[in-house]
Image (tube, rainbow, N blue to C red):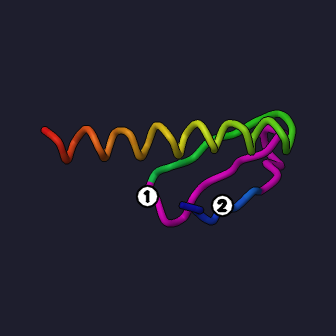
Amino acid sequence: MEYPIVLEQDPEVGGYVVYCPTLKGCVSQGDTEEEALENIKDAIKTYLESIENFAIT
């Protein structure tokens, strides 16, 4: 499944902030665009695993 993401440059701290609007609270960051994109992939995976674990319990 694919999830839309938003990648924005962070003018205050530098680097990039990335989030998935369809998964409330699923946010990550990185010093480069590439790092931020890799980090959001991990964040989405962790988010979905936590939902799955919550549904099982």
Residue for point 57% across, 58% down: 20
Q: Earlier in the sequence, mark 2 or mark 1?
A: 2
Coordinates of residue 27 in the picture (x, y in percent): 57, 47
Label placed on residue 57: none
Residue located beneath label 1 in the image: 24
Q: Find the magenta span and give its range.
A: 8-24
Q: What is the residue that sits farthest to the front in this orientation?
A: 1
Q: Which mark is residue 5?
A: 2
Q: Is 53 within the magenta?
A: no
Please name whichever residue, 20 or 16, is drawn nearer the observer in this view of the structure: 20
Which kind of residue does numbered mark 1 sit on?
Answer: Lys
**Which quadrant, please, contains the C terminus?**
top left
At label 2, which amino acid type do we have?
Ile
- Element at label 2: loop
Q: Residue at x 59, y 62 (%)?
A: 2
Between 4 and 21, the one nearer to me in the picture: 4
Q: Secondary structure at mark 1?
A: loop
* Magenta residues, dominant SS class: loop
Query: Is 4 left, or right, of 33 in this rendering?
Result: left
Image depth: mark 2 or mark 1 in front: 2
Q: Residue furthest left?
A: 57
Q: Nearer the viewer, residue 39 or 53?
A: 53
The residues bearing labels 2 and 1 have C-alpha atoms spaced at a distance of 12 Å
Q: How many marks?
A: 2
Q: Residue at x 55, y 40 (%)?
A: 43
**x and y, in percent, of residue 49 in the image:** 38, 39
Residue 13 in percent (x, y) is at 78, 38
Q: Is residue 21 magenta?
A: yes
